[in-house]
Image (cartoon, rainbow, N blue to C red):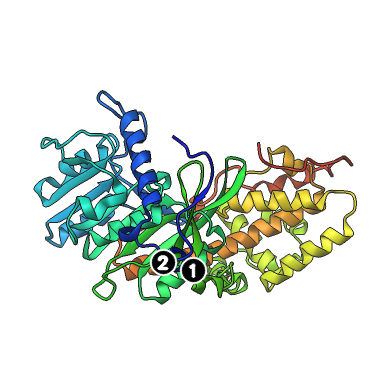
Amino acid sequence: MCASGSQGFFSSAEKSLPYVNPAQRPPALQAAINDEFAIIKQLKGDGYISTGDRASCYGFVFYGMHRLDSDMVLDKAVEQGKCLTVCDVGAGAFGFERHNLSRYGEKVINVGITATSFGTDSSTAHVIGQNAEYLSSVFTPEQFDFIFSRLTYIHLVDPVGAIIEAYKTLKPGGKLFIDSFYIRGCERYLSAILDHLKEQGYRVSGLCEKEYLYAEEVARMVNFIIQKTPEKPELVFPVSYGEIDRYYRVHYHPGSVLLQASPVAENLSLLYQKGMNIIEAKIQEKCKHADLILQCRQLPELFANPVFQTLDKLQKYLLILGLVAAMNKDYANIQARSEQEAQNNKLYDMAYFCQVKSFTFEIYYSQLCCLQYRDMFKQLSTQQQIMLLEHVAASNIIRFARADINQQELMQSGLSFSEIPIDRIFNDDDVLTFPMLAQHWQPAPEKQCPVSLRR
């Protein structure tokens, strides 16, 4: 059942506790965790049949450019002659455990934890009906080589505490893989949290993603991977317990080290510069007509160029990014032009344009997205449409830089991954492939634009 409203966990004395420690959870938080678990167990009682995910292999995609999955990770470890113990947090329909048993046999001991009381099934894997928020109490310290979890931590009452619990059960050198989770109350500090963990010597990687949930913009951590090292036997997140909301979810307070940092830890200008260098190298490698960047000064001029129209999709994509980089040597240039556009363009609602831009970047992982069929894009003026394309291109330039950094982090942790061919990182309806149809674009009629994109 949901609580009637938000409540604080701490007295004034307790609020001095620095960071989350699941061993010192306040009684009110423990009660919330136990109540929520009891509800889930009741929902998944005897005879419950999971209709959710039945994945046999857990996969993680990074910025649409490289991918790893549990098979890659376990294959490499087994090839090294290791006998592994693997835990699946949120075992669901046990597809992962059965898959591993079939693929690796006795080389991998599979343990799954689920809210459903299935007990132990020796024919498939060891499955334990317990609460994942108390993982170090369910299992012994340093028990697992790998822990995988999908569609579970995003639903927990205290996800940060549960991750710390999971970290305790990893062997030195072990790795924890989580698809996504929220750090409610610290949405603006997700990048800063990752940076802090790296500065403290943790081998960690993750992506920060915004989305709309319950008609509100929220942020979450996705593709979170952390390796336990001998130098870091304990995991400490720079956040403190805050309040519990009516959905039985903890809201955290950013620690002092986060408050002293910028809420947006990433330096977009530096990432943009790094991405420009990557794009330049790829243009030299892939494009036969790189000189088009020197011949054209604006995107519409490039779209109308007859040579450009004969090129394949990949070359068009790279040339568009290259031209935007040549037009804007610094990411701040694009931001400044947006502000100027807001002052000069009186016919259209600039606030609406900014909403479209935000929607484009955040909902789709800062990747390209299909806009040509969306009414909200058509309602922009042609000038604003072109400006939006520039913003999306700049976002993709930054994405190349982020993907390169993430790839280095995965390599540092000794993880195997596969690169997604560059011509597959966008689809046929991609926003940067349909500008060939620019001659069909018409300025939007002079009318009031909607004030919200949420549907």
Which element carries disc 2, helix, strand or loop?
loop
Residue at (26% x, 23% y) in the render: 47
The reply to whether discs 2 and 1 touch (Cβ–Cβ < 8 Å) is yes
- For the C terminus, the image quarter is top right
Q: Is residue 404 visible?
A: no
Cα distance between the residues tagged 2 and 1 = 7 Å
Q: Nearer the viewer, residue 60 or 448?
A: 448
Against 260, residue 210 (above or below) is above
Instruction: State the image coordinates of residue 52 (x, y, percent, origin top left).
Output: 37, 33
How packed mark 1 is, by other alpha carbons closer than 10 Å (few <14, some 14-19, many 20 or more), is some
Q: Quadrant of residue 172?
A: bottom left
Query: Front-most of 268 and 417?
Result: 268
Q: Which residue is mark 2?
A: 19
Left or right: 332 in relation to 342:
left
User: In this rendering, would 236 be left or right of 363?
Assistant: left
Q: Residue at x 32, y 50 (%)?
A: 133
Residue nearer the viewer, 27 or 131: 27
- Where in the figure is residue 148, as x and y percent of width and height? 29, 51
Give me the residue at 66% from left, 68% from top: 325
- Residue type highlighted by circle 1: Gly
Q: Which residue is mark 1?
A: 255
